Amino acid sequence: MTKYAVELKDLCRTFKTRAVKGTRKKQLVTALDGVDLRIKEGELFGLLGPNGAGKTTIIKILSTLLFPTSGEAKVLGYDVMKESHKIRKVINMVSGGESSGYGLLTVDENLWMFTQFYGMPGKVARKRIDALLRIMELEEKRNVKVRTLSTGMRQKTNMIRGFMTDPSVIFLDEPTLGLDVNAARMIRKFIKNWIRAKPERTVLLTTHYMMEADELCDRVAIINEGKVLACDTPENLKRLVAQESTLKLEIRLVKDIRAFENIKGVKHFTYDHNINAGLTKLKFILDDDAIVSDIVSAVPKSGSKIVSVEKVEPTLEDVFVTLVGRGLVNDI
Amino acid sequence: MAIKQNLRTMKWAAWLGWQMESNWADPFLFIVYSVAKPIAGSLILVVMYTIIAQLGGDTDPALFSFMYIGNAFFMYVMLLLWHVTWVIHDDREHFQTMRYIYIAPFNYFIYILGRTISNIVITTFGVIITLVFGVFVLGVDIPLGAINWPLFVIVMVIGLIGIMAFGLALAGISFITAKHSMGMNEGIGGIFYLFCGVIFPVSVLPGWGIAFAKILPTTYWLDMIRRTMGVGAGVDPALAGVSMTSSLLILCISTVAISIFAVLIFKLGDYIARSKGLIDMTTAY
């Protein structure tokens, strides 16, 4: 029987806003509108959506910071309404785009204090802090006060705080928001390695960076205006918008083009000789990705050599645009 | 296991509180501030007493001792009312760590208690300086040999629990307010200052004021503090008729009652905040 790290059933959350000036009426804003999701243990699951889509609301509910208005939310089988104390023992969370941390403490003091709040034995805590500081390249900053750190370093410290307790489920709410390319890349690499090293752990990542979701996530749910519009692997989501994929090859001037004709599974085939450059550009529209190897192995038969291969696929951006009707801003 | 973890939480919360209180300046400046602040507070009281004495045309050393002791120990009241609430406000608004603290698998009451302990220690330092300054410089009459130390310690502990309970109730309210809880602390502190016989006897209050004072545990706490220290006897006729045992009993019962009330208010505030999504709000106050 599949064990779920996270289960959301018909989850709804509304917020009352302040009354509009001049009226007594409060507005009711729907942040989540009947969300159903199941995240398996060991998954790196992404919630992809624009600002205000409801991603953070889901994270807040799951991390016991917020009650749902209706519906059910469970973490490792524990109900967020009734068993928050059990959930807190097995989770942690990291939010991006904030400047949290006790600035008057050093990096090491901040981290150590949290290990003690989580009841971690001293030796284990020390070992984990040291290892994570090394991975995040913050060793030299361990005795520096948090208030003097750059945004990227603060976020790395925040990541260490979240991961050092070795949670069974970790919620990452836009962890790379506002970071420079290098810091964001380091954090993505760290997340990937962490889940690879501990496959039984689960990561729920919210992001509005398409590339991040595509690169990291086993499955992605696209969410907009509190509703899940689609949920699948990035590959399958892309297939939603394109049943076919495109393969482009650049080869040394081909002698016998017939080697590429009539390959089973090729829907459409075009070529273009560039005699001056001594190259031939081939373009295949495929029914199935499995035949890429057949095409590549046909190159030697044609008496030529491969210069470059490019598989052109629809992106999550295309999926998002198709489902939501508009694109995301600030993509990286 | 749970006790061990609670003690650990308290220890590190107290350490954090101490860092916050002491880490903002170099140690020398911090010590100067810690000594100068209570002494300055005492001198304000001297000015107040001088004016009262001149208006009355007489000086009464017992009244001055009454005022001085009341004022010294009232430091705990203002501190605890303020600081217990400030823990939430500070974590939420200033350091923005509230969400991480809140989801940590520890007892949040223990965390607040720990954060407050460091302030109790600092305030105790201030109270001692105030008393020493009063005895040796201002001539406040505290008969050291006559102090009933065991009872004094018991009264201190019960009193601090009671005041902390008031603070906890206010902390519960601060979960759902932005800056207003701070004003509320000062307002309630002011009410205690006025009605609990801090610098003038309860007996000078109007009838309704005396009745109100007699339902406040802080009134009995300050009265018991003075009695165990042998200070201000006969200054306040409104409480003179209440025996030491009765006063202690009232203090105990009211402390238990306010503690239960405070926990309920705190839990209610927590529930409302979690329902409305206010736990980790930042309002820039």
Image (spheres, grey):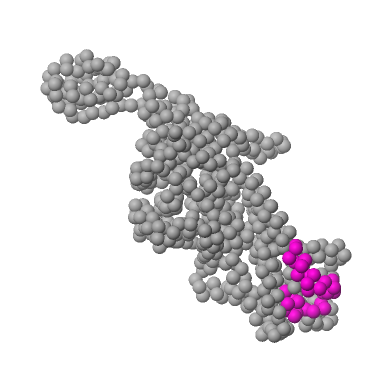
Q: Position of residue B84 (x, y in %)?
A: 63, 60
| Apparent side of residue A302 relative to residue A107 in the rendered image (left or right) | left
Q: Does the magenta segment cover residue B37?
A: no
| Apparent side of residue B187 relative to residue B38 in the rendered image (left or right) | right
Q: Is residue A276 visible?
A: no
Residue appearing at x 82%, y 72% in the figure:
B242
Residue appearing at x 45%, y 44% in the figure:
A169
Magenta part of the protein: which range? B225-254
| Apparent side of residue B184 relative to residue A251 in the rendered image (left or right) | right
> Residue A278 sits in which quadrant?
top left
Q: Is residue B252 above or below residue A240?
A: below
Q: Position of residue A134 (x, y in %)?
A: 34, 55
Of the pair A277 and B232, the residue shown nearer to us: B232
> Residue B6 sits in which quadrant?
bottom right
Q: Is residue A43 above or below residue A96?
A: above
Of the pair B240 and A311, the residue shown nearer to us: B240
Q: Position of residue B275 (x, y in %)?
A: 62, 42
Residue appearing at x 68%, y 81% in the figure:
B134
